[in-house]
Image: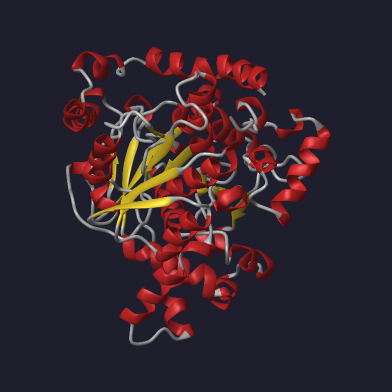
Amino acid sequence: MPKIPFGPNYDEMLDPSLVDKSVRAKALTALKQDELDPINLFNITWKDATNKVRKVVLPTALTGIDANVVVMLGCGFPSGSHKVGPAYSTLIEGLVDGEIIPGEHTILGPSTGNFGIGTAYVSKLLGFRAIVIMPDNMSKERYARIKKYGGELELTPGSESDVILTLEKTRELMKNPKNKALAQFELFPNYRFHRHVTGNSAIEAVKGVGNGRIAGFTSAPGSAGTLAAGDQIKVAFPEAKIAALEPYECSTLANGGRGQHRIEGIGDKMCTLIHNVLATDFVILIKDEETVQGVKIFHDGVESLVKMGVDRDLALSLRDAFGPSGICNVLGAIKMAKFLRLGPGDNVVTVATDGFDRYNSVLDEMNSRYLELAPVVLDRWTHDIFLGASEEHVFDFRKPSVKEQLYLQKENDWIKFGYTKQFLDSMRSQGFWDAQYAKVQDYNLKIAASR
């Protein structure tokens, strides 16, 4: 049996200064020189080499609001996205619990992209065969990255909004006992990673920014894992409001809407099992074309940003740090700040899940749809999309009677996969989620002991 190169526990992913200094140094070197060195598992963190959260604070010249929009940058994670964190957490928990056995099991990764890339990546580093189940209409760069890491593809019909088909295919493949799924939509390591690592990193990210508090957190759910950061943010800042963002074209949580859209990684026609409805205060709709146009602006419209008053060096730093879902999250943060009437000193935190490296083909497709993309067009887009973001399509879910809509959506989605109403009802208590989170400390000890 091959030796498994066990990686960090939850505390070490949150604070890599807890890792042995020599290991940390080797990991930082490997991140630049050999991404397939297993020591890169110790680079699964929001922190940079100086142990500071990778982030950017967007200027008022771009956002048009007085509040700060603080964006945590996921492109610095191994494999290029923070989704590698929950993929690793789910696999490592399975290993220390003895449910996943090296040399015996094949890893399944149901996904629309970044989680699948993360599954292929951590499986490669930990010595497992990986099969990624995903829709057949995603960006070609995502498929190429999965294959680069040795992952196999099992494609299902459709796009973002057809992720339910990937779950059904995963269930079918799980009939073979040799297959173990890193089921991001329903397994709680995803929740634990984001509540502990992303949530506490967000709290650190606002230190020294504005009033040092978080007034709002926005994230567009695919699995809804990242939204778990909101649970921990509310512990530190009870007044903080959490918003789930959806494509205008597929507004399932907001009003039961269903449709196709182009924001890769989000909007899956469901309320996922690990989505803590209690912590969701708002659902905000974002138009998919604006997110793709936003990527075009950040990547190719540096001059347009400078004309708006954005510092040139900052504008240049944005070029490769955002994909469509990151732009979606920024637009949601602006809309939330306007809706809540946030002012100077207030902070809204969000994340850029990945970077531009997997969206060249998306821009190529968009470019083919427009007759002209002269600088004046990008100037207009920059003004209309960011400064023009309005309070429209903000749905308030703070009242228990309104939240019931989300609980019913979750029942409709998950009872057919074998979960009981009694179990789903238990999720209506914050105690359920706190008990799941408390397991972080048990796994800290288990992972360290196994290592």
Q: Nearer the viewer, residue 207 or 116?
A: 116
The structure residue drawn at horizontal position 56% and vertical position 14%, both measured from the top left corner, is 442
Q: Is residue 241 above or below residue 383?
A: above
Q: For residue 385, what is the image quadrant?
A: bottom left
Q: Does 39 sit left or right of 241 as displayed?
A: right
Q: Position of residue 409 (x, y in %)?
A: 20, 32
User: Extreme front residue here?
Assistant: 1
* Image position of 278 with respect to 70: above or below: above
Q: Residue at x 22, y 13 (%)?
A: 422
Depth order, front residue of 111/409: 111
Q: Quadrant of residue 136?
A: bottom left
Task: Please state if 346 lies on the left or on the right of 153 as rendered.
Answer: right
Way the structure is coloured: secondary structure
Q: Position of residue 449 (x, y in %)?
A: 66, 17
Quadrant the N terminus occupies: top right
Nearer to me, 17 or 209: 17
The answer to whether residue 22 is visible is yes
Residue 411 against residue 39 in the figure, above or below: above
Given residues 69 and 197, the one toward you in this image is: 197
Name the quadrant containing residue 249: bottom left
Say if residue 337 shows up in the picture.
Answer: no
- Quadrant the C terminus occupies: top right
Q: Give the tally of numbered discs.
A: 0
Residue 100 in percent (x, y) is at 47, 26
Q: Position of residue 204 (x, y in %)?
A: 65, 35
Residue visible at 30% across and 48% down? 267
Is residue 82 positioned above or below 144 on the image?
A: above
* Residue at 23 percent of width and 31 percent of height: 406
